[in-house]
Amino acid sequence: MVSVSLCMIVKNEEDVLARCLESAAGLVDEIVVVDTGSADRTKEVAARFTDRVYDYVWKDDFAAARNYAFSLAEKDYCLWLDADDVIQEADAAVFLELKRTLDPGTNVVMARYNTGFDDAGNVTFSYYRERLIRNRAGLRWEGAVHEAITPVGPVVYSEFAVSHRKTRPGDPDRNLRIFEKLLARGKTLDPRQQFYYGRELYYHKRYEEALEVFQAFLTENRGWVENNIDACCLCAGCLECLDRPREALEALFRTFFYDVPRAEICCEIGRWFIRQKLYQPAAYWYLTALLCARDDRRGGFVCPDCYGYLPCIQLCVCYSHMGQQARAKQMNELAAAFKPDSPAVLHNRAYFEAC
């Protein structure tokens, strides 16, 4: 059985850190907590679980901090978690089986990162991340913001997941500040960092600037295919907010240069047509979404609802507007098969019963 060091970087996380460490303590063989300048009781909480708590002077560089935490690990593999992450009981059992069976020559274990949930706790947004890294294999974190380790084989995909369960908002300006400091110092952003810089500009509603960054990113054609697809979608979002809807649709179609249609893209195109009150083409794209194969291992962001519930509930809307009430009711019931207690499904049932 391989051994695992949990390596964390934390700051002012007294409210969530115990929850995280309680979920992981029975799964790992060592816990390393690196504090980057807490002003609360974070280090006291960490000390209840481990005597390996270290101070680190923050340098506006997440990769540097994570590499420092990994450098303190003594076990076969490094597991990283954020303080507001948890490993659910079912995932813990899968993790323990993975430890028992993992080939010690494996460099990276990819695992699901569930970051969005509906009111019933169902996952609405997830993607694979490099979660277990073989210690002393020369693999390092890169990127001051949205840091990552490039997986180098052998790579294994596991079905255990980490759930990101935020309890409060973070600093919404932190990442943009870091990017702007890097640029002010004359730093050239690599393609991944360029993509995330554009995304931060988008989140801050600086749409013209974001559009410029994304268009340069796509023109240079050095990005990862999943980032290229997301950049097109974010361009569409910028253009829509700038009241340039036709160009927004063109940006969505640009995703097809990079790979086969994804259900997420088809749903966005369907939404565009609904906004224009063009229900027949909207229905076409939602039907196409239902035909798309879900493949989480491509590594991109995945919205599970786009592969079932969302197209069905939107097809109900489309067919109703087209006067095809029987088909609309049928699609509502198909949506109910995915989410029986959906408020939209229940509302639609009441509507059809009243007709």
Image: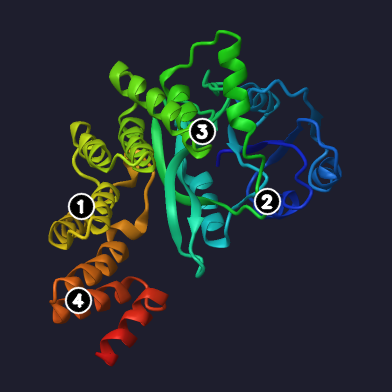
Label 3 CA crowd tier, 10 Å (few <14, some 14–19, many 20+) = many
Q: Nearer the viewer, mark 2 or mark 4?
A: 4
Type of amino acid at the residue the image marks with label 4: Ala
Residue at disc 1, secondary structure? loop
Q: Position of residue 132 (x, y in %)?
A: 53, 36
Residue at disc 2, secondary structure? helix
Q: Earlier in the sequence, mark 4 or mark 3?
A: 3
Left or right: 60 in relation to 95: right
To which residue does mark 3 refer? 200
Left or right: 256 in relation to 354: left
Type of amino acid at the residue the image marks with label 2: Cys
Q: Position of residue 298 (x, y in %)?
A: 31, 39
Residue at disc 3, secondary structure? helix
Looking at the picture, tell me which residue is in the foreground, 42 or 100: 42
Looking at the picture, tell me which residue is in the foreground, 55 or 176: 176
Looking at the picture, tell me which residue is in the foreground, 311 or 291: 311
Q: Earlier in the sequence, mark 3 or mark 1?
A: 3
Query: Which residue is located at x 53 percent, y 57 percent?
Result: 93
Q: Disc 2 vs disc 4: Cβ atoms closer than 8 Å?
A: no
Residue 342 seen: no
Type of amino acid at the residue the image marks with label 3: Glu
* Dot label at residue 20: 2
User: Which quadrant holds the C terminus?
Assistant: bottom left
Label 4 CA crowd tier, 10 Å (few <14, some 14–19, many 20+) = many
To which residue does mark 1 refer? 292
Residue at disc 4, secondary structure? helix
Q: CA distance from mark 2 to mark 1?
A: 35 Å
To which residue does mark 4 refer? 328
